[in-house]
Image (cartoon, coloured by chain):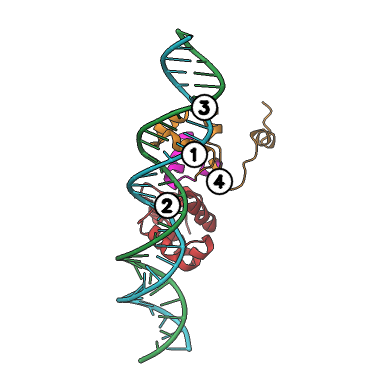
Chain colours: A red, B orange, C cyan, D green
Amino acid sequence: MLYNRIALFRAERGISRKALAESVGVNPQTIGYLERGDYKPSLELAMKIAAEFDVAIEHLFSFKPFEPVAAVLRRAGDSA
Amino acid sequence: MLYNRIALFRAERGISRKALAESVGVNPQTIGYLERGDYKPSLELAMKIAAEFDVAIEHLFSFKPFEPVAAVLRRAGDSA
DNA sequence: ACATTTCGTTGTGTAAACACAACATATGAT
DNA sequence: ATCATATGTTGTGTTTACACAACGAAATGT
């Protein structure tokens, strides 16, 4: 199982699956498959999505479950 | 075409294809295919190799040719 | 001279990442 | 009520990343 934050970043930026799919050159269904972990992306696709969100691949895909955002905020000492 | 620095890091550390293949759980031939760009790795394999060399994926794989090490050394102001 | 290791390459088979079409449901706008 | 948009899911087909076996060539060690 490969975990990812695609839906998270998509929600934060208000981008639809269709729009993201067009940006990175794949089918919208492919984004859906990725988001629910039905299959793992190629390195090429992973790099394109990471570039689209301007994040490191390691922050977007992981073989260990991601820490909840709330925990990250606390850990980062975010007082906002 | 996907460029990579697998052979470079392998040479620097004196690791054979066979040894690297065993470390990341693939066939030695698969390492050969990757090194000469015959095919592109899955995200999973890319992450394993990057972890093995302890480098960021972006320093190991790129769709643009890599800068020669000599140029990187100059740019880094390495006086050694 | 011989054995071992490493590398390069090629052929065949399989599993999985994709493309694409199709359909259901929900929501929001008009 | 209707239309558009977003999402979720399923089915079929193609491409390709792999596994594995096999072979040749060069370097190294004995």
Circle 2 is placed at which residue position? A72
- Which one is earlier in the sequence, the residue at label 3 or at label 4? 4
Residue B33, numbered label:
1
Circle 3 is placed at which residue position? B13
> What residue appears at the point 54 percent right and 55 percent down from the top-left corner?
A51
Decide whether the magenta segment is chiefly helix, strand or loop.
helix
Query: Start and end of the magenta stretch?
Result: B40-59
Q: Is residue B24 visible?
A: yes
Residue D4 location (% of width, % of height): 46, 81
> What residue appears at the point 42 percent right and 52 percent down from the top-left corner?
A72
Residue A64 location (% of width, % of height): 36, 47
Residue D8 location (% of width, % of height): 34, 66
Q: Please tell me whether mark 3 sits on a helix, a strand or a loop.
A: helix
Circle 4 is placed at which residue position? B2
Q: Amino acid at mark 1?
A: Tyr
Q: Please tell me whether mark 2 sits on a helix, a strand or a loop.
A: helix
Label 3 packing within 10 angstroms: few (<14), some (14-19), many (20+): few
Mark whose residue sits in front, 2 or 1: 1
Q: Please tell me whether mark 4 sits on a helix, a strand or a loop.
A: loop
Q: Amino acid at mark 2?
A: Val
Marks 2 and 4 belong to one chain: no
Marks 1 and 4 belong to one chain: yes
- Chain letter of mark 4 equals B
Label 4 packing within 10 angstroms: few (<14), some (14-19), many (20+): some
Q: Amino acid at mark 3?
A: Arg
Q: Nearer the viewer, residue B69 or B22?
A: B22
- Which one is earlier in the sequence, the residue at label 3 or at label 1? 3
Q: Is residue B54 visible?
A: no
- Chain letter of mark 3 equals B
Marks 3 and 4 belong to one chain: yes
